[in-house]
Amino acid sequence: MLFKDFTSEINPHQAYRIKKLKRQLETAESYEAWKSIALKIDEESGAQEWKLDNCSPYFDAEIITHRLAMLRRYRQQKRTQDLMYILREGLSYDIANIAHPLLFTVAYVGTKKIIEDYIEEVSQGLAFIASESCSCLSNAEKLAFFKHCQIAYGQPAMMFSGGATLGLFHTGVCKALMAQDLMPKVLSGSSAGAIMTAMLGVSKPAEFTEILKGQNFYSEAFHFRKISDLLKGNGGLADVKYLKNFLIENLGNLTFAEAKERSGLDINIAVAPYDASQDARIMNAYTSPDLLVWSAVLASCAVPVLFPPVRLTSKRYDGEYTPYMASTRWVDGSVRSDFPQEKMARLYNINYSIASQVNPHIVPFMQDDIARFRKDIISWPERIVRRQGKVIAKGVMDFARERVDKVPPVRRLLDHGYGVVDQRYYGDVNIVGKYSLRHYSYMLQNPRPYLFKTLQQEGERATWPKISLIETHARVGKTIQHCLELLNYQHAVTDATKSTDLEKIQ
């Protein structure tokens, strides 16, 4: 966290208390306990005073102050049309840049009070329009307004990275978000993240809690082949049959269309054609409704060298299983599209994304928000090295690819390497694992209760500091959703009442 603005005013005794509280923070067993300690740190550090100061280079406080005053006045005076007008013109989660990541790095909990007040007032304004107190609009007019708001505002997406067994970290992220009712309805996953996505995607909402207890993950999915089999030259280091059996056992034979109907979630599995000349794809209920979910997940887990490329399977209209693009073999989606943000944005009207990142070759190079968004001169050398390093790496691999075109295995390896370097690994909100050397020993272990509990707890603790940020982003969208649910319910009740009255008359 950023405490540079306050350190000059902190005496040695305060510094000691903050240090002690930070140690307690690292061992917190629940979000409630973590939040209680975090608020004490904010109080001791001076972050609470920072919240009351509207001055910041990262957002336009003047715009927010002006809009807040108008929203409050129109709601209190019940000027419905004026309220709707000003709400419509500001339907964006980052209006006046209030979603800037650095606004959420100073305090452990919350951000500028003016931003929190603005979000609260927007939510109250929306709730007023949906309520019975707003009598100048019919139920149909209210429904039309909120449907417009839902489209204009968009919805969030959750993205799970690859990472082999380290992907159990994602269960902790899900557990923490679900406990606060902040889990998005749009999910994507590649490799290990595809397993997490599919586990939720084929289950009923009432089963989510049971899945996150971990029993479904305990298996022998990683089973390495004998040396004699490896010398034959077919397949990868691990036997794909064990992984396939694990997926079928847990995911069943549901298609993407059937999975969406069952869970209510829009799940997306990232896969990549073995032939690198073709672009990576996301499989979902829109692009491949008849594709079996376990089949797509198996392909997304087919890490080159570890597993061989696989073919996909569809379920035909008559229930018969048939090959999906029979001439094409598929591999791990994280090779070229770990986080398919742009593709999902077009399909689902995504406004912001939450990324859970545990890929072992990516995490060590990830930067936190403070490092990423620093603009001071001291940060320039590192920024230049990072950007130029990426450019040089891509240039070298591109140069090499042109000259080894006649050696397919080498060309394919360079294509995969280019895809890894050329990707965007950040979302709008990033939840990143903290790695030590022991984590690399977990990578290809079959999940066990102790390992599951350890990685899940790490996922929870990595998520808790991001809860305030996600809550701020999600508040308006969830209010719109709840208002629509209320209005649809009232509309259904009204229709049922009318139908009953008509029957009585007849």
Image (cartoon, grey):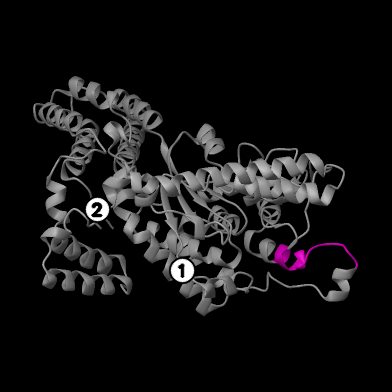
Residue 29 appears in view: no
The residue under the point 29% across, 32% down is 95
Q: Nearer the viewer, residue 490 or 96?
A: 96
Seen at 16% across and 56% down, the residue is: 6
For image coordinates 79% across by 46% down, the residue present is 411
Q: Amino acid at mark 1?
A: Gln
Indicate the quadrant where residue 484 lies: top left
Q: Was residue 139 drawn as part of the magenta stretch in this picture? A: no
Q: Is residue 130 above or below residue 46?
A: above
| Image-based side of 326 in relation to 94, left or right | right
Q: Is residue 32 above or below residue 391?
A: below
- Give, as a single range, the part of the protein colored magenta: 232-245
Q: Which residue is mark 1?
A: 456
Residue depicted at 43% across the width and 53% down the height = 367
Query: In this rendering, does residue 126 appear at all?
Result: yes
Dot 2, crowdedness within 10 Å: few (<14), some or many (≥20)?
many
Q: Residue furthest bottom?
A: 450
Horizontal arrangement in the rendering, residue 382 relative to residue 249 (left or right): left
State the SS at label 1: helix
For mark 2, what is the residue? 106
Residue 466: percent from left, percent from top: 34, 55
